[in-house]
Image: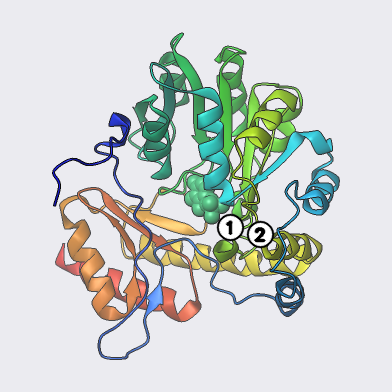
């Protein structure tokens, strides 16, 4: 075999590969639940499934490149101009397009850490430099420190609200104060993948903040509350130049016809889907209360997951959960993120947490 390989971009060296949540599987055939990817535990709604089946009949054809019908629906739903809506292959896809559109070698992308694992990866792929600003001791975005970190090389700042993996939020007053400090030529991306799970009235809707601020872009997804994780469709709401850049950097035909039709059907079934979200929020309260009863320190979560800071015991805890039948998401040396899932799955997690707590 030749020693000479095709030359690859130096930026790709050392990029951590994105770690998807482990699938649920068990050697002995016992039930195993996946609480590792913040997915919606409910199966597809019958009406949404029907629209997908109907759309599948045309998969010999390319989809609508511009996602016209979906963009129409979103523009109407959010009360924004069509030109301000851009779709992509999940909001991770759109986030990558945003970085590609704004930052290259020599530029900086700021985000909190720990936060969403995709941010360092997509930043490094673009050749830009990550500037990671530690969360506060309470696991919340340190917006003052993030504003202080802005330099004339900064091109984009991610604010993940609620934050993955801690579930914590930033509230209206502090976010507006932060936005007022950011130079108008720096793009702020409000990643609101879990927006529909928020019950704290002090947490702003990014779509309201973007209206008066041309440098604010809101990211939303159909993967979590709407239950379409496997179909890959997300979107951004942003002012004209940013939305136009997203249309230029999109992978052509990336959002399938099936995904477009499922997203439209889901928007039309919001009442039913948000009823499910309400049930998950009740489960979240039950899980957090039970953990606190067990004397765990749990940060206030507004998302569909909880964060346990287990430090050195993180991997042991994840292994204990797995033996009990639930797969969680460990971040070695830091903590575990556990999705709020089916009641039975949450019960197994809570029982495991209780036993583990007694050992600590
Ligand atoms: C899950 C998630 C997304 C959305 O992922 P998709 O690509 O839309 O499936 C985006 N941002 C954060 C912080 C997430 O946790």
Q: Earlier in the sequence, mark 1 or mark 2?
A: 1
Report which residue position mark 2 lands on: 256
**In this view, the mark in front (1 or 2):** 2
Query: As rendered, which of 331 and 144 lies closer to the eye?
Result: 331
- Which residue shows up at 72% across the image and 37% down it? 207
- Residue nearer the viewer, 347 or 276: 276
Residue furthest bottom as drawn: 29
- At mark 1, the secondary structure is loop
Residue at label 1? 232
Task: Say whether mark 1 is within 8 Å of ligand 1.
Answer: yes
> Element at badge 2?
loop
Q: Quadrant of the C terminus?
A: bottom left
Q: In whole angstroms, how far apart are the C-alphas of marks 1 and 2?
A: 8 Å
Residue 299, relative to residue 48: is it above or below?
above
The answer to whether residue 310 is above or below residue 156 is below
Residue 66: give x, y in percent of width and height.
Answer: 75, 46
Vertical arrangement, residue 68 with respect to residue 177, above or below? below
């Amino acid at each position: 075999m030749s020693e000479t390989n095709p030359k690859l971009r130096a930026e790709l060296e050392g990029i951590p590969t994105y770690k998807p949540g482990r699938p649920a599987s068990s050697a002995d055939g016992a039930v195993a639940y996946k609480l590792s990817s913040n997915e919606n535990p409910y199966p597809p709604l019958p009406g949404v499934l029907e629209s997908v089946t109907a759309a599948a009949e045309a998969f010999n054809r390319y989809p609508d490149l511009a996602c016209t019908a979906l963009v129409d629906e979103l523009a109407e739903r959010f009360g924004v101009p069509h030109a301000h809506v851009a779709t992509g292959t999940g909001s991770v896809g759109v986030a990558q397009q945003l970085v590609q559109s704004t930052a290259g070698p020599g530029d900086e992308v700021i985000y909190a850490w720990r936060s969403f694992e995709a941010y360092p990866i997509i930043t490094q792929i673009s050749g830009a430099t990550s500037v990671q600003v530690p969360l506060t001791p309470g696991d919340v975005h340190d917006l003052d420190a993030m504003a202080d970190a802005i330099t004339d090389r900064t091109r984009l700042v991610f604010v993940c609200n609620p934050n993955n993996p801690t579930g914590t939020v930033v509230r209206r007053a502090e976010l507006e104060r932060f936005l007022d400090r950011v130079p108008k030529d720096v793009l702020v991306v409000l990643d609101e993948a879990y927006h529909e799970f928020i019950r704290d009235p002090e947490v702003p809707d990014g779509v309201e903040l973007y209206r008066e601020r041309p440098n604010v872009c809101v990211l939303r997804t159909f993967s979590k509350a709407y239950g379409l994780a496997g179909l890959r469709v997300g979107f951004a709401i942003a002012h004209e130049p940013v939305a136009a850049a997203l249309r230029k950097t999109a992978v052509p035909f990336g959002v399938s016809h099936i995904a477009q039709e499922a997203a439209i059907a889901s928007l039309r079934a919001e009442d039913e889907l948000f009823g499910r979200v309400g049930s998950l929020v009740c489960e979240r309260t039950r899980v957090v209360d039970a953990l606190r009863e067990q004397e765990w320190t749990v940060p206030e979560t507004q998302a569909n997951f909880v964060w346990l800071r287990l430090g050195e015991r993180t991997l042991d805890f994840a292994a204990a959960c797995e033996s009990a039948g639930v797969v969680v998401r460990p971040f070695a040396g830091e903590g575990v993120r556990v999705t709020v899932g089916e009641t039975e799955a949450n019960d197994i997690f809570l029982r495991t947490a209780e036993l583990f707590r007694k050992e600590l």
